[in-house]
Image (cartoon, rainbow, N blue to C red):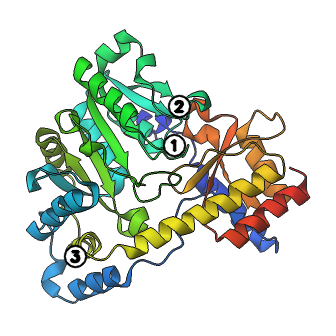
């Protein structure tokens, strides 16, 4: 049987391969420290669990959810004002989606036709590339470099490419590189988008995991942002509900409407009990979110301090739940290094090359273990002589 050539756009899924090898090592009795996948190990807030369970007890809530409830849409609007200080978000500027990964695909397809150009960060979370390719668009990668603090520099994008581009993907705090946006960076991005009539798609999954400075915010809070773009806002990392896929696209009304129209062709909307859980998260207490941020910071410090102490260059980790570390010892292949590190130390990380061409020479480490276990992982790396 001959399958679609669309499948040829993508290589093997790296996380599945790493997980298979992890299971093999554990079967051998090896101690394994899996820092490859960014799934939080914290417990969801009890009031969020209770809201989902209570809603699921009502048989009516098991029908098709053909729309987002008024309560949910108002909760998002209020949250944007209370948490981010963004006023003027109205229900027609909000749509739920099954995680940013799903939403990104529909956004790319709603904005671009085959042959169009899209501006994608490099390194980046792989779905930015995948959504672009599935839309038939051509990615143009703008580099995130150590010399520029792994922040976007739109001034480096060639003028002819900018004129041809339909959208610009920005992700801050950034997965995988851990950089955090500044007012100056956002100001240049918005001016660039207006100059070239480009839509900005901003991924805001890690606004509550920011270290070493002011609290994280929203792209939509900057002057002119609502004129040029939308933001994917996720509850997954802040409230530890990754499996529930509670995310939203928020922003310019016509863009949200276009994404909604496309998605409605293949989906009936977010399950009502999940909508209830999202409302509980958005309207409930946030003390746990801050405690969790401090816990992530303690993990960041334990891992980065430890790696630096054994001779690694101090990793970049100012935000998100990831550490972006340069491979030590002059090695060049991140794939080979990940396999070596796994076999010799039991520490599993993700090769930087999985996140784009500029990721080569780096690895990504997820802060998914407590500080004492991260210190043990560093000791295992040191004992292995890596």
Q: Earlier in the sequence, mark 2 or mark 1?
A: 2
Q: Give the camera-side residue of 316 and 135.
A: 316
Residue at image mark 2: 144
Question: Compared with residue 32, is residue 209 higher up or lower down, i.e. above or below?
Answer: above
Query: Image quadrant of residue 104?
Result: top left
Which residue is pictured at 43% across the width and 69% down the height? 290
Query: Image quadrant of residue 233?
Result: bottom left
Residue at image mark 1: 179
Q: Give the camera-side residue of 54 and 381.
A: 381
Query: Image quadrant of residue 192?
Result: top left
Q: Residues within 10 Å of mark 3 (few under 14, many from 20)?
A: many
Q: Give the camera-side residue of 156 and 236.
A: 156
Residue 153, percent from left and from top: 45, 25
| Contact between labelled residues 1 and 2, with CB atoms less than 8 Å apart | yes
Residue 331, percent from left and from top: 80, 35
Residue 3, percent from left and from top: 44, 40
Along the horizontal axis of the image, is 101 left or right of 89? Answer: right
Residue 100, percent from left and from top: 35, 52
């Amino acid at each position: 049987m001959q399958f679609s050539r669309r499948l040829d756009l993508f290589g093997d899924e790296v996380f599945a391969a790493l997980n298979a090898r992890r299971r093999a090592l554990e079967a051998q009795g090896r101690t394994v420290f899996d820092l490859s996948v960014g799934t939080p190990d914290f417990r969801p807030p009890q009031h969020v669990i209770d809201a989902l369970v209570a809603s699921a007890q009502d048989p009516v809530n098991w029908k098709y959810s053909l729309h987002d409830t008024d309560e949910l849409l108002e909760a998002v609007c209020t949250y944007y004002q209370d948490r981010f200080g963004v006023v003027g978000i109205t229900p027609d500027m909000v749509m739920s989606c099954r995680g940013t990964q799903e939403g990104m695909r529909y956004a790319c397809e709603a904005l671009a036709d085959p042959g169009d150009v899209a501006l994608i960060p490099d390194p980046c979370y792989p779905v930015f590339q995948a959504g672009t390719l599935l839309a038939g668009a051509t990615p143009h990668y703008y580099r995130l470099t150590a010399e520029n603090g792994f922040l976007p520099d739109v001034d480096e994008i060639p003028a002819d490419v900018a004129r041809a581009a339909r959208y610009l993907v920005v992700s801050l705090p950034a997965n995988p590189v851990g950089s955090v946006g500044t007012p100056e960076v956002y100001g240049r991005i918005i001016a660039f988008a207006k100059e070239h009539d480009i839509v900005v798609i901003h991924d805001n999954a890690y606004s509550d995991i920011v270290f070493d400075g002011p609290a994280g915010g929203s792209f939509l809070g900057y002057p002119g942002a609502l004129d040029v773009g939308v933001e994917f806002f996720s509850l997954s990392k802040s409230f530890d509900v990754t499996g529930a896929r509670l995310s939203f696209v928020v922003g310019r009304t016509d863009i949200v409407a276009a994404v909604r129209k496309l998605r409605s062709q293949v989906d009936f909307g977010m399950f009502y009990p999940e909508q209830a859980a999202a409302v509980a998260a958005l309207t409930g207490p946030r003390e746990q979110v801050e405690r969790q941020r401090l816990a992530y910071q303690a993990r960041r410090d334990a891992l980065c301090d430890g790696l630096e102490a054994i001779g690694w260059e101090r990793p970049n980790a100012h935000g998100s739940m990831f550490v972006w570390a340069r491979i030590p010892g002059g090695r060049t292949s991140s794939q080979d290094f990940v396999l070596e590190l796994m076999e010799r130390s039991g520490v599993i990380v993700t090769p930087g090359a999985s996140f784009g061409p500029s990721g080569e020479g780096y690895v990504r480490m997820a802060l998914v273990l407590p500080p004492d276990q991260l210190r043990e992982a560093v000791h295992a790396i040191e004992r292995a002589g890596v």
